Image: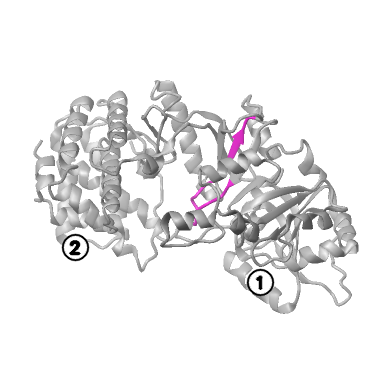
C-alpha cells in the first residue's frame, strides 16, 4: 500500500519557488546529450547549471576577469565540476580546439551584434564546431535594437540552415518556443494562454490581458531564438530528433508533426511540455512531458505505470483519461508522450458554486474510481495503521506538534489498527486538485497528471482533497483570498457544500465497502499526508505556517464543528 508515498523522502526546501534550472531553449535541440558546449559570453547561472548537466564539458569565454569571478562563485555554489571558465586574450584568440564543439551558445546581445557584423567570428565558430554542431542565440525583446525580425537577414548570411523561433516572454528565461513560420501553432498557444506575457499589467483585469496581447505591444517586445546547424534541419520543422526516436520506438511516427514548447513554472518539479500537431490540424494530437532534473524522473515513470495499469483495468475512457503513447529516457531525463484530451480547464469552466455541475461530475468520477478499484482483501487494518505510522513519524520529524495534537493523531491511527472491518485499498490519483481537471466537450471531468498515483492507495483521500480544492475556489470567487478561512467556511461551518460532502462520503463508503468508523481517521491522515508533501515546497522559516499543517491543526482544534460532527457520525 502507498508504495510511491512510502518510498518518497520528504525533505523541506527541496522544491521551493524559484529554484528552477534555466536554458529552456535546450529542450528544442536535436539531442540532450553533448560532449562539449562553448558559451561566448556569460550565461545566467541557471542556464549554466542546465548546460553542465547536458554536457560532458562546458567552456565559457568570459568578457573580463570580473565576469569570470562571478560565474566561478555561481559554479561553486551549484557544485559544477565540468565547467571551465576562460577569458579571451587581448588579441581576441579563444583557446578552443577546432572541430570539438557540439554547441556554441552566444550568451548575450553584444555577442549577437558582433556576429551580425563580424564574419571572421562566424568563420571561427564554424571551425570550432563538429560537422553536426549547432549554434544557438536569441535576439529581440523590449530593450534590444535588433527587435525587428528583418535583422535576421543580417545574421542568417553564412549560418548553416538557420531556424527561427517565436519566443515568450520578451525578456528573461524563455518559457515558450514555436517555429516562427508555424502560424497555426502560435495561434493555438495564444488561444490557450500557453504564452508568457512580455508585460504584466496587474490590477486591470481583462483590460490588462487585452493590452498584453495588443499587436503594438507584441511588436515592441517581439523576441526570437535562432538555432543553426545541419543537424537541426533534417527534416526541417520536425520535432526534435530525440522525441522522434523515442516515439518511433513505440511505433508512433511524429516526424511530420508540427510542435511548440512550453516550459512554464518556477518549481523544479514543473514539467516541460511539447505539443505535437498533425501537419494539417489546428489541435494537438500528443502532449509530451519531460522532467527538468533526473531526480524527478520517478514522477513521470509513476505516471506511465499508472496510466498503463488503469488502461488494463478498463478504467476511464479516451475522453476522460490520458492514454500513454510512448515513454523513454534521453539525456538522463524521463519523457512521457500522452494522447491529448480535448477539454477546457476546470477553473475556466466552473460556475464557482457549491453545486457546480462540473465539480459534481468530477466528484462522481472519483467515487466511481474508488468503487471500481476497491480491494478489501489486500491488507488488514493493522497493517494500514503501520504504514500510516511510518508517515506519522516522518511528519513529527518535520513539524512541531503540540502534545494534544500528537496524542489525537496517535489515537486516530489506533482506531484504524483495532478495526475489525475490512479496509479497502483503492486506486488513488494522488493530486486531484481543480488545476488537474479538464471539462470535456460533453461536460465530463478528465483528471490529468497521474504522477502521484497510488495503485493501492487510501480510500477517501482523493475525494476529500478535490472537495477541499473546489471549496477554496468557490470562496475565492466570492472574494475570500485566505485558503484556510475558505476551508473553514465549507468543511467546518454549515455551508452549501456541507450536504454534498456528507452525501458523497456516505455514497463512497457504501460503494467501496469502507466502514464509516474509518472516515474520521482517514480525514485527518489525509491532511497529514498533504502536509508531508507540501514540506518540500517550504523553507524552514515558513514550515510551521504551511497551509496544510495549519489546516490539520485547525481541524483537530475544531473537531466538534457542525460539518465535522455530521461527517464523523455517518
Percent x, y of residue 329: 61, 39
CA–CA distance in space, label 1 to label 2: 46 Å
Where is residue 493 shown, x and y percent of the image?
Answer: 13, 50
Dot 2 falls on a residue whose secondary structure is loop
From the viewer's perspective, tell me whether residue 531 is left or right of residue 254.
Answer: left
Percent coordinates x, y for residue 274 in the rendering: 59, 41
Viewer-nearest residue: 155 or 94: 155
Question: Mark 2, residues whose alpha carbon is within 10 Å: few (<14), some, or many (≥20)?
Answer: few
Mark 1 surroundings within 10 Å by alpha-carbon count, few (fewer than 14), some (14 through 19), many (20 or more): some
Q: How many marks?
A: 2
Give the mark nearer the N terminus: 1 vs 2.
1
Residue 411 on image: x %, y %:
14, 48
Residue stretch in magenta: 262-278
Q: Mark 1 points at which residue?
A: 72
Task: Tell me the tag on residue 402.
Answer: 2
User: On the rendered structure, is 373 left or right of 138?
Assistant: left
Residue 273 in sight: no
Give me the residue at 12% from left, 51% from top: 559
Amino acid at each position: 500500500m502507498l508504495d510511491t508515498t512510502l518510498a518518497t523522502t520528504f525533505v523541506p526546501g527541496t522544491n521551493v519557488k524559484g529554484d528552477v534550472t534555466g536554458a529552456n531553449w535546450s529542450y528544442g535541440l536535436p539531442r540532450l546529450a553533448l560532449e562539449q558546449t562553448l558559451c561566448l559570453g556569460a550565461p545566467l547561472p541557471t542556464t549554466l547549471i542546465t548546460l553542465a548537466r547536458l554536457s560532458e564539458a562546458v567552456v565559457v569565454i568570459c568578457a573580463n576577469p570580473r565576469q569570470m569571478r562571478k560565474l566561478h562563485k555561481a559554479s561553486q555554489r551549484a557544485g559544477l565540476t565540468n565547467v571551465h571558465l576562460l577569458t579571451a586574450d587581448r588579441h581576441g584568440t579563444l583557446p578552443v580546439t577546432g572541430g570539438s564543439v557540439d554547441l556554441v551558445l552566444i550568451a548575450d546581445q553584444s555577442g549577437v551584434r558582433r556576429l551580425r557584423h563580424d564574419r571572421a567570428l562566424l568563420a571561427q565558430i564554424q571551425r570550432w564546431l563538429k560537422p553536426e554542431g549547432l549554434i544557438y542565440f536569441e535576439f529581440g525583446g523590449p530593450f534590444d535594437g535588433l527587435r525587428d525580425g528583418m535583422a535576421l537577414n543580417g545574421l542568417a548570411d553564412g549560418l548553416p540552415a538557420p531556424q527561427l523561433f517565436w519566443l515568450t516572454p520578451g525578456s528573461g528565461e524563455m518559457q515558450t518556443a514555436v517555429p516562427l513560420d508555424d502560424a497555426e501553432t502560435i495561434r493555438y498557444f495564444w488561444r490557450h494562454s500557453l504564452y508568457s506575457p512580455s508585460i504584466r499589467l496587474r490590477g486591470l483585469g481583462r483590460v490588462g490581458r487585452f493590452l498584453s496581447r495588443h499587436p503594438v505591444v507584441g511588436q515592441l517586445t517581439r523576441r526570437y531564438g535562432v538555432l543553426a546547424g545541419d543537424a537541426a534541419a533534417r527534416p526541417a520543422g520536425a520535432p526534435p530528433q530525440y522525441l522522434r526516436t523515442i516515439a518511433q520506438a513505440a511505433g508512433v511516427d511524429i516526424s511530420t508533426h508540427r510542435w511548440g514548447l512550453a516550459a512554464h513554472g518556477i518549481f523544479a518539479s514543473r514539467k516541460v511540455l511539447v505539443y505535437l500537431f498533425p501537419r494539417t490540424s489546428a489541435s494537438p494530437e500528443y502532449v509530451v512531458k519531460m522532467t527538468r532534473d533526473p531526480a524527478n524522473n520517478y514522477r513521470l515513470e509513476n505516471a506511465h505505470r499508472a496510466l498503463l495499469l488503469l488502461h488494463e483495468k478498463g478504467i476511464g475512457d479516451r475522453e476522460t483519461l490520458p492514454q500513454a503513447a510512448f515513454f523513454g529516457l534521453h539525456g538522463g531525463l524521463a519523457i512521457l508522450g500522452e494522447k491529448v484530451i480535448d477539454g477546457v480547464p476546470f477553473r475556466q469552466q466552473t460556475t464557482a458554486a457549491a453545486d457546480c455541475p462540473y465539480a459534481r461530475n468530477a466528484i462522481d468520477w472519483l467515487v466511481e474510481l474508488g468503487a471500481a478499484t476497491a480491494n478489501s482483501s489486500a491488507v488488514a487494518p493493522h497493517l494500514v495503521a503501520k504504514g500510516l505510522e511510518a508517515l506519522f513519524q516522518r511528519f513529527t520529524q518535520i513539524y512541531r506538534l503540540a502534545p494534544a495534537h500528537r496524542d489525537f493523531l496517535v489515537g486516530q491511527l489506533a482506531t484504524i489498527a483495532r478495526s475489525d472491518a475490512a479496509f479497502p485499498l483503492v486506486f488513488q490519483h494522488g493530486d486531484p486538485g481543480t488545476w488537474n481537471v479538464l471539462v470535456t466537450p460533453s461536460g465530463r471531468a478528465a483528471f490529468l497528471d497521474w504522477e502521484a498515483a497510488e495503485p493501492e492507495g487510501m480510500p477517501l483521500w482523493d475525494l476529500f482533497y478535490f472537495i477541499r480544492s473546489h471549496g477554496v475556489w468557490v470562496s475565492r470567487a466570492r472574494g475570500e483570498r485566505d485558503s484556510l478561512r475558505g476551508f473553514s467556511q465549507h468543511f467546518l461551518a454549515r455551508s452549501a457544500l456541507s450536504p454534498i460532502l456528507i452525501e458523497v462520503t456516505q455514497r463512497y463508503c457504501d460503494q467501496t465497502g469502507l466502514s464509516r468508523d474509518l472516515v474520521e481517521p482517514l480525514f485527518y491522515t489525509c491532511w497529514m499526508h498533504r502536509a508531508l508533501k507540501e514540506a518540500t515546497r517550504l523553507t524552514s522559516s515558513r514550515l510551521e505556517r504551511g497551509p496544510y499543517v495549519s489546516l490539520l491543526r485547525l481541524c483537530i482544534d475544531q473537531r466538534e464543528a457542525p460539518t465535522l460532527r455530521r461527517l464523523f457520525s455517518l
